[in-house]
């Protein structure tokens, strides 16, 4: 193997990676804008971008990685409910209500960063294993998905929560079946109904619960209350779960994280959720890249965009982009996250929640036109059900699993 230095090509690649980092930063800090949506927009404009296709692909992957680091920031800062509703709040919001939001940011950054370090050496053996198992998984995909749904339901806290979870799964699946095949006219050609569906199912209910609340309270010091060994173990669980997401279709990061949390000791609580979920989201990008190379099957919107843009699958170049984006993403979470929390803490929570709700509706319109607004409203109504009856929101992933089960 010979290593050669090509200054012009290197500078070009670094410039594209920097551009991808900037786009990932913007998309990660905008509530309701999923990395997949940004990736599909990039795929739409990629043919007109002057530059080597490989560098364009490095930019796309960099944007996706930075997004997975930074998406925790608006998640923690927006939609913080009234303290009286803390029991029904998201784990990250519970930490914010306790004044531990700055710690939560660092837990997320560490979870994602360690996941990158673990995923890269694990990617090759995991890929070899999945290549051999893939024919069996593909032939029995419906059984695998139904088993995952069954585990999620059976591990709810009581019978009422199980029933509510089943209702949320069925109704969200029906919504997905009715809408995912639609191709509505929209201002953005690379749009689709997935953006308003996810905004309604997972974003709007949290913001609705925050209306009338007290917003982000003053936050304490950023000290992390998880040991190095515990952090590595939690990130490791997230990494393994990220491998499942990277290779098995319809298994989202939320599903994988919820399943992996069954193995997390209860003493870690909300902190364990934040670390593990962040590890899943970031590790997923790396494993999905190897799945695309080995199986020819893109498992994330970012990798779909890479494939549509006909990017050469040079793994060393793409992994270098992932590594650089991960380092920058880690630093950005810490530097931008604290400021984000402070700024949001000064804004009236009701006005902020209503503004973001309207903004999510606008994103739905941009990606799917008037149909997108209808999808957003319908999804928001369904999304309110789990939290009202203390069931997990992950059952709403029926919006993707249901249509796949029906082919």
Image: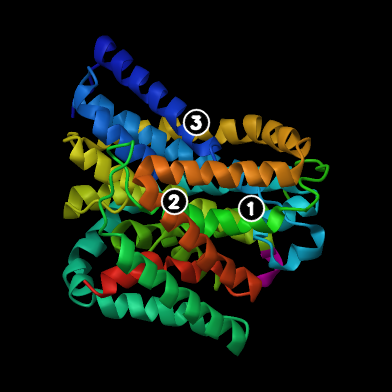
CB atoms of marks 3 and 1 within 8 Å: no
Q: Which residue is under mark 2? A: 373
> In terms of depth relative to the viewer, which is nearer, 95 or 90?
90
As helix, strand or loop, the secondary structure at mark 3 comes to helix
Q: Residue furthest front?
A: 370
Whether residue 338 sits left or right of residue 187 in the image: it is right
Quarter of image, res 405: bottom left
Q: Is residue 6 visible?
A: no
Measuring 64% from the left and 76% from the top, which residue is drawn there? 389
> From the image, which quarter does the N terminus lie in?
top left
Q: Which residue is under mark 3? A: 26
Whether residue 255 sits left or right of residue 367 in the image: it is right
Query: Which residue range is magenta in the image?
Result: 264-269
**Residue 207's disc number:** 1
> From the image, which quarter does the C terminus lie in?
bottom left
Q: Residue furthest top?
A: 8
Relative to residue 87, is residue 278 depicted above or below? above
As helix, strand or loop, the secondary structure at mark 1 comes to helix
């Amino acid at each position: 193997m010979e290593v050669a230095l090509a200054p012009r090509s290197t500078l070009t690649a670094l410039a594209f990676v920097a551009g991808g980092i900037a786009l990932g930063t913007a998309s990660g800090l905008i509530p309701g804008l999923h990395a997949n949506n940004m990736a599909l927009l990039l795929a739409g404009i990629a043919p007109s971008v002057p530059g080597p296709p490989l560098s364009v692909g490095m930019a796309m992957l960099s944007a996706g990685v930075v997004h997975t680091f930074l998406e925790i920031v608006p998640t923690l800062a927006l939609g913080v409910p009234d303290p009286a509703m803390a029991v029904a709040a998201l784990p990250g919001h519970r930490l914010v209500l306790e004044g531990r939001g700055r710690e939560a940011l660092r837990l997320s950054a560490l979870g994602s960063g360690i996941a990158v370090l673990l995923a890269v050496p694990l990617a090759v053996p995991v890929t070899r294993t999945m290549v051999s198992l893939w024919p069996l998984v593909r032939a029995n995909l419906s059984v695998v998905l139904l088993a995952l749904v069954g585990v999620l339901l059976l591990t709810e806290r009581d019978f009422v929560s199980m029933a509510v979870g089943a209702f949320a799964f069925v109704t969200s699946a029906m919504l997905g079946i009715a809408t995912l095949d639609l191709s509505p006219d929209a201002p953005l050609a690379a749009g689709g109904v997935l953006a308003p569906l996810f905004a309604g199912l997972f974003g709007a209910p949290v913001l609705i619960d925050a209306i009338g609340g007290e917003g982000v309270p003053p936050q304490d010091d950023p000290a992390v209350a998880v040991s190095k060994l515990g952090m590595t173990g939690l990130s490791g669980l997230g990494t393994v779960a990220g491998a499942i997401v990277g290779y098995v279709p319809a298994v989202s990061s939320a599903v994988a994280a919820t399943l992996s949390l069954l193995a997390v000791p209860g003493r870690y609580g909300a902190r364990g959720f934040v670390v593990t979920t962040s590890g899943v989201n970031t590790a997923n990008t790396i494993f999905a890249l190897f799945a695309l190379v080995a199986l020819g099957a893109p498992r994330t919107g970012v990798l779909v965009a890479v494939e549509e843009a006909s990017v050469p699958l040079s793994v060393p170049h793409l992994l270098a982009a992932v590594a650089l984006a991960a380092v920058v993403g880690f630093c950005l979470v810490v530097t931008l996250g604290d400021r984000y929390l402070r700024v949001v803490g000064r804004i009236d929570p009701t006005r902020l929640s209503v503004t973001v709700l309207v903004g999510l509706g606008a994103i739905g319109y941009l990606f799917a036109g008037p149909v997108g607004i209808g999808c957003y409203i319908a999804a928001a109504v369904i999304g309110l059900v789990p939290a009202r009856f203390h069931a997990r929101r992950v059952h709403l992933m029926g919006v993707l699993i249901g249509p796949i089960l029906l082919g």
